[in-house]
Image: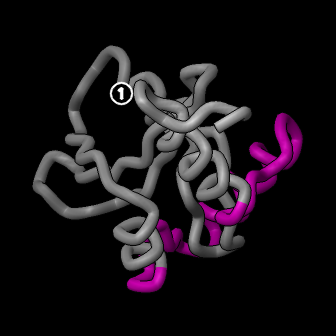
Amino acid sequence: MTLYLVRNDSGAPIWVAHNDNEQRIWSYMQNSHDFYLNRGLYRDFYFEQLNTYEMIDCQEAELRISEGIGLLEPTIFARLYANAAKEVEARTVDEIFDAERRSSCDGPGAPGPLD
């Protein structure tokens, strides 16, 4: 599981994204303060690669979120939010960051459950 700062083709930061252990891409929407599945980013991340994806940690993601990344114009947000709400529940920032923190401790040399 990894957090990314997503930049568009002109280099402007547009999303904080999370790639989960099922290879799904979630993006943060400032309007609702939650992460949602983002099929467009999935397609871009795995196939098109028009955006750039910089790996970031939770601290950098929190900073970008506090700066307002992922804020959508209300009419665009209303349409995307309605579509997202039909298909899957949102993930909170805490859920995403908790998953990130757990996965960063699961690598080689990390303490096991009996350590």
Residue 102 lies in quadrant? top right
Percent position of residue 94, x then y: 69, 64
Percent position of residue 55, x then y: 29, 46
Percent position of residue 44, x then y: 35, 27
The residue range painted magenta reads 66-94
Residue 74 lies in quadrant? bottom right
Percent position of residue 16, x then y: 43, 57
On screen, residue 22 above or below 56: above
Instruction: Give the side of residue 96 with respect to residue 15, left or right.
Output: right
> Which of the pair 78/57 is nearer the observer?
57
> Which of the pair 50/52 is nearer the observer?
52
Instruction: Give the side of residue 40 with respect to residue 7, left or right.
Output: right
On screen, residue 108 above or below 55: above
**Magenta stretch: residue 70 in it?**
yes
On screen, residue 41 above or below 11: above
> Which of the pair 114/20 is nearer the observer?
114
User: Residue at position x 76%, y 45% from top?
Assistant: 84
Residue extending farthest to the top is: 47
**Magenta stretch: residue 80 in it?**
yes
User: Residue at position x 49%, y 35% from top?
Assistant: 110
Q: Residues within 10 Å of mark 1 (few under 14, many from 20)?
A: few
* Amino acid on which disc 1 is placed: Asp
Residue extending farthest to the front is: 115
Instruction: Give the side of residue 82 with respect to residue 21, left or right.
Output: right
On screen, residue 83 above or below 69: above
Dot 1 lies on which element?
Answer: helix
User: Residue at position x 43%, y 48% from top?
Assistant: 3
Residue extending farthest to the bottom is: 67
> Which of the pair 28/103 is nearer the observer?
103
Quarter occupied by the C terminus: top right
Q: Which residue is mark 1?
A: 44
